[in-house]
Image (cartoon, grey):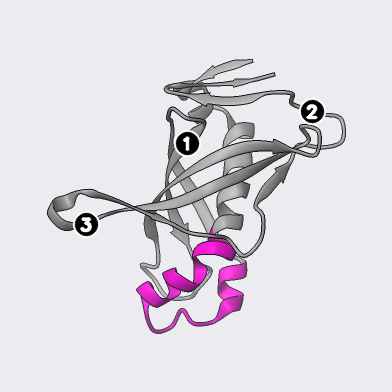
Amino acid sequence: CRMTEQDVNDSPPVIEVLKDLLVFLVRYGLSAGASKTLGKGYEDYNSWNTTDVVLHHVKLCKDNRLQVRAELRPNTNIKGTELPLTIRLGLALEENGRKIIVESPSLITRGLFNREVIVPFMPLAKSGADLGPDFHLSKLQVMDGQILAE
């Protein structure tokens, strides 16, 4: 199966798998830093356990990597808590192709003169999406503008 970037962005099942991966990354990789950035009122770890991520766009890059533009929505009672973020990540297969895992995630932000700054981060646990007992992939390759899955 070969999908273009548009196909990926228009596919609810693919977006749902990517959302699951991002939610895990946010909860176990970015939550501490994001709570410090957002400031007072976000210290409660339990609110990050129910953090939601809304995906806006997935860009398929070369070297088996994706770039995801999304919005972080902590489960808090404070209005205006949405935090836009862009994450670059690699994908790999594990457990005989039953699980897609994230490799080398990085937060992309803007620095001096609005230049792109890539900040690698390490989740506290391995992030993966289980494809189910009857679904196996033998190949998963992300290329510029398309993804190939067999």
The residue sitting at 53% across, 69% down in the picture is 75
Q: Amino acid at mark 1?
A: Leu
Q: Secondary structure at mark 2?
A: loop
At horizontal 58% and vertical 60% (from top left) the residue drawn is 123
Which residue occupies 39% across, 62% down? 82
Q: Amino acid at mark 3?
A: Gly
- From the top left corner, tell me how far across and down residue 147 is, in percent: 54, 23
Is residue 23 at all visible to an observer of this figure?
Answer: yes
Residue topped by disc 3: 111
Mark 2: few, some, or many residues within 10 Å (few <14, many ≥20)?
some
Q: Is residue 71 above or below residue 96?
A: below
Circle 3 sits in a helix, a strand or a loop, which is it?
loop
Q: Nearer the viewer, residue 104 or 98?
A: 104
What numbered label is drawn on residue 54? Answer: none
Q: Position of residue 13 (x, y in %)?
A: 64, 33
Residue that carries the numbered disc 2 in the rendered image: 136
Provide residue 12's location: percent of width, then percent of height: 59, 33
Q: Amino acid at mark 2?
A: His
The segment highlighted magenta reads 26-49
- What secondary structure is marked by label 1? strand
Give whichever of discs 3 and 2 has the lower sequence position.
3
Image quadrant holding the C terminus, namely top right
Q: Nearer the viewer, residue 110 or 45?
A: 110
Q: Check the image and report above or below for 86 versus 62.
A: below
Q: Quadrant of the N terminus?
A: top right
